Image (cartoon, rainbow, N blue to C red):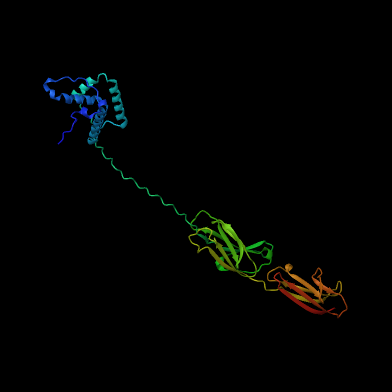
Amino acid sequence: MEEIENEPTTIQDFLPAESIESPEPFPQTPADSSTKPFFQNIAAFLRRYRLPVLIGCALLLTSGVVGYAVWKPNITPKTTTTENLLGDLVSDSSKTENTDATQSAEDQQEKTASPEPLGSPTVSKTPSPKATPKAQVTPSTIVLPKPTPTATPADYVFGSDRKIIRSYDDGSGRGAVTTTHDVSSSPSFDPVIDLWNDSIKVCTKIQDNNDTGGILAVLIVEDNGYQVSATDEHPGETICKNLFISTGQHTITLKINPNRTHTESNYGNNTLQFNYTMKGDTQAPTYEIFGPVKDETHGGTCMFVQHITDNLIRVDQLSVEHFIDDQVKIPDANGRICVLGTAGESHTYRVRAKDKAGNLNEQSKPFSLL
């Protein structure tokens, strides 16, 4: 093999020639002269590259501290941030530049001085938790919501006092005569003398079985299907409604709450129905014709009627007409119709008597003058 010329044998041989400074004389050690070149080279290397070396040492130291803190989770590590590391490096660099004059002494101390041991991190003792007595659990009382009371619906009915009252004038001059009948009896009424003073009315009372507070109830009165009245009435009050007095049978229907405007618990008792009858006047007035008689005072022949009666009304309320040969005559003060003329003349006397119901009694009688 060929020997390689100029084979590097020391650290200085690896460095550029211009970057190599003349190292300061290194003290001789007679006891071990074989190590002199090695230590000289190390010292020169450290003087030349002291800043990178210091940075590397700082990084190693920081890595060790961080690793130890991670490995010991109960130990509170010192907070290490990138800003703190950079600050330490800058501080070390400034210190190195300011101490170039005494670098040799520092290098010697770096060789001989052993690194200070890391301070043992302070372990914070976590106090053992004290046993807290368990609170006694008191079961809470469950309060159920009270149900909302449901409003009681009404229950309209007719009271037990149900009457038909008839009032009329009997022509005696004593005033009105009143008769009372229960609706269940289906009363029948005779015609009266004075129809203007005749009246028939039904009287009853609306009641609410559930007593819901006197809500107004509609009351409709019908007579043979024809609506007589429709009014709002208060339960508990007596109500009287006039009815028809026309001749014939009448069917009366009373209806409470007919359209179910108000809610009820029972709609089946809202109707009351009954009957009554108004008798018709079918009897005409009665009378008798008298004459002829001689009028001794004035002369002439007189005709007249007597004993006029009617089943209902007074005589003075009857319509009585007098005729002589179809000519209307007015009776004198004595109620007579007198005719003057030649004796033996023939004539006819006619009378028409009619009551307010229209019943007519017509009679005629021929006669001769006396």
Q: Residue furthest right?
A: 342
Residue 1 lies in quadrant:
top left
Residue 154, position as x, y percentages in the image: 50, 57
Against 101, residue 64 (above or below) is below
Q: Residue at x 21, y 27 (%)?
A: 12
Say which of 52 and 25 sits in front: 25
Taking depth in this image into account, of 314 and 131 the one nearest to the observer is 131
Farthest residue, direction left? 31
- Say left or right for 49 vs 176: left
Q: Is residue 119 visible?
A: no
| x, y percent for residue 17 | 25, 26
Q: Residue at x 83, y 73 (%)?
A: 338
- In this rendered view, identify the residue nearer to me: 271 or 114: 114
Residue 99 lies, in percent from the top left, at 27, 20
Relative to 356, 95 lies left or right: left
Observer able to see residue 317: yes
Instruction: Please identify the quarter of the rendering in which residue 240 is found.
Output: bottom right
Q: Which residue is nearer to you in this view: 231 or 345?
A: 231
| Identity of the residue furthest to the front in this view | 2
Q: Is residue 106 above or below residue 138?
A: above
Task: Reply above or below: 258 against 79.
Answer: below
> Going by the image, does 219 lie left or right of 20?
right
Residue 173 percent coordinates (x, y): 69, 62
Rendering quarter of residue 123: top left
Q: Quadrant of the C terminus?
A: bottom right
> What is the total number of numbered labels drawn onto the structure image?
0
